[in-house]
């Protein structure tokens, strides 16, 4: 007969054995569909992991657009008879897209980053590396006090000259805010005739003045009083969550390049693998996302009307013959105003029209592929204006309802800024990031 200590010891052993078996079972089940660490070499090919376990949170402010098929082009008659957007069925890969247009606050983060980096270069706030290269010392750059008279004296090269000051006030010369980007041109590198070319031949380097053109509010409308918006729209906190405007296509592309660099610099500092590039959506991606899974409807909310059953307007545009405030906004409204479409995207119709990465070519629909259709061209300054046209989608606060339709396409020149054109970004992520 067992004594109590012996019984307790036997019970503990049984519990330990059961726990060990459970852990082994859970470990074996948990490995299903997951990568294993590379085992010790025994002459067999068993694969090698890159960067260890993949961790990437949901991109902030973005929504997931699942893969699918839709009919690209007009969902109604082509009232302009231009035949520039014939209806065709295409299939799209999945991607992530900003839920709203890029706001003044978000673009201001970009402006301030460029401002501080330019100032750090003037002050020689840099870190030197053994190979002779250098980078900005952001610990010092973040200590720059722009209102300090002594600091302003050291940064005089970035301050407006005395003859251009108002009441002697020292202000930053925003023309000095240049963002230098480097982007690899995969399309050129993929051409067979370029197979043996040096990699440097396909790196696109650009220096872009990134401050928004606030004078567009006056320039776009003759004999119209819009000075308050020219003075305050980008600089006043009341408009922080409104979509940024006065940004041309090149500036929008520079923002995407910076956003990519900003994220990947953080991931690299944590020893994590870098991600795909943020970029402007292609024309097909934009239309697919705007439809929200509704293939044959004229507007992001469905349609066929611009009002709901209660008579409320569903977007910010030019109702009737010019009753601008009827929809709730005389000019732009908050980027998250009105109801989102079925994908969770706000203002895919109205508020501000949006840049895409696509070249505007009248007959593009006739020869583009039916899988992720795309047509791009990196226009140079010396190219004719026709080659600088980029597709603009969605319509804006100053447009009539026709331009709000999912299938309506128009264009603007890549070096031109308007008070009614903004943008949003997309990013392609691996399947693991979408679960």
Image (cartoon, helix red, strand yellow):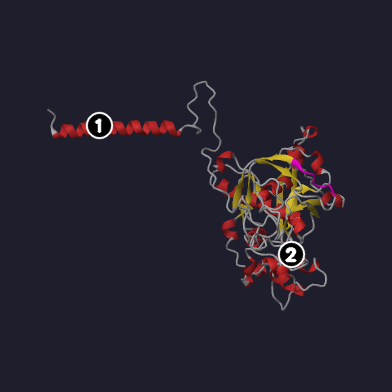
Label 2's element? loop
> Which mark is in front, 2 or 1?
2
Would you identify the image quadrant in which residue 108 lies?
A: bottom right
Closer to the chain start, of discs 2 and 1, is 1
**Mark 1 burial class by Cα count in 10 Å: few <14, some 14-19, many 20+:** few
Magenta stretch, residue numbers:
82-88
Give the alpha-carbon distance from disc 2 to disc 1, as whole Å.
79 Å
Q: Measuring 34% from the left and 30% from the top, which residue is drawn there? A: 21
* Residue closest to the eye, 154 or 176: 176
Magenta span: predominant SS is loop
Label 1's element? helix
Tell me if 51 is positioned left or right of 310 in this view. left
Residue 13 bears which disc, if any?
Answer: 1
Is 42 part of what is drawn in magenta? no
Question: Marks 2 and 1: CB-CB under 8 Å?
Answer: no
* Residue 382 visible at all: no
Q: Residue furthest top?
A: 43
Percent coordinates x, y for residue 330 in the rendering:
71, 68
Percent coordinates x, y for residue 302 in the rendering:
67, 52
Q: Residue furthest bottom?
A: 167
For residue 340, above or below residue 198:
below
Tell me if 415 is positioned left or right of 263 in this view. right
Picture quarter with the C terminus:
top right
Picture quarter with the N terminus:
top left
Percent coordinates x, y for residue 189 in the rendering:
75, 37
Residue 319 bears which disc, if any?
Answer: 2
């Amino acid at each position: 007969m067992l004594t109590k200590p012996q019984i307790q010891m036997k019970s503990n052993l049984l519990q330990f054995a059961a726990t060990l078996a459970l852990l082994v079972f859970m470990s074996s089940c948990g490995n299903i569909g997951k990568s294993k660490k590379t085992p010790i070499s025994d002459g067999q090919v068993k694969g090698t992991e890159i960067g260890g376990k993949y961790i990437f949170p949901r991109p902030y402010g973005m929504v997931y657009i699942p893969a699918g098929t839709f009919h690209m082009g007009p969902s109604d008659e082509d009232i302009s008879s231009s035949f520039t957007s014939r209806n065709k069925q295409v299939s799209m890969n999945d991607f992530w897209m900003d839920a709203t247009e890029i706001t003044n606050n978000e673009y201001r983060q970009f402006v301030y980053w460029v401002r501080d980096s330019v100032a750090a270069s003037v002050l020689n706030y840099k870190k030197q590396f053994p190979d002779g290269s250098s980078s900005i010392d952001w610990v010092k750059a973040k200590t720059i006090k722009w209102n300090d008279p002594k600091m302003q004296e050291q940064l005089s090269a970035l301050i407006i000259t005395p003859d251009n000051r108002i009441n002697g006030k020292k202000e930053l010369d925003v023309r000095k805010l240049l963002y230098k980007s480097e982007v690899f041109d995969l399309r050129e590198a993929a051409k067979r005739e370029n197979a043996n070319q040096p990699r440097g031949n396909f790196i696109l380097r650009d220096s872009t003045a990134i401050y928004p053109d606030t004078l567009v509010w006056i320039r776009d409308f003759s004999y119209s009083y819009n000075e308050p918006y020219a003075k305050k729209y980008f600089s006043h906190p009341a408009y922080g969550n409104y979509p940024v405007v006065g940004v041309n296509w090149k500036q929008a592309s520079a923002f995407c390049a910076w956003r990519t660099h900003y994220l990947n610099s953080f991931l690299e500092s944590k020893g994590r693998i870098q991600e795909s590039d943020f970029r402007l959506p292609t024309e097909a991606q934009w239309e697919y996302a705007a439809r929200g899974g509704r293939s044959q409807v004229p507007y992001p909310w469905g349609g066929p009307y611009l009002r709901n059953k209660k008579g409320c307007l569903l977007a910010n545009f030019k109702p009737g013959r010019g009753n601008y405030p009827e929809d709730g906004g005389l000019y732009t409204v908050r980027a998250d105003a009105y109801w989102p479409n079925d994908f969770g995207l706000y203002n895919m119709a109205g508020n501000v029209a949006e840049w895409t990465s696509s070249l505007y070519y009248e007959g593009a629909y006739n020869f583009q592929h039916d899988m992720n259709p795309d047509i791009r061209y990196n226009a140079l300054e010396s190219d004719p204006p026709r080659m600088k046209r980029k597709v603009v989608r969605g319509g804006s606060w100053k447009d009539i309802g026709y331009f709000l339709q999912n299938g309506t396409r128009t264009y603007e020149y890549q070096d031109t800024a308007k008070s009614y054109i903004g943008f949003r970004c997309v990013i392609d992520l691996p399947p693991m990031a979408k679960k």
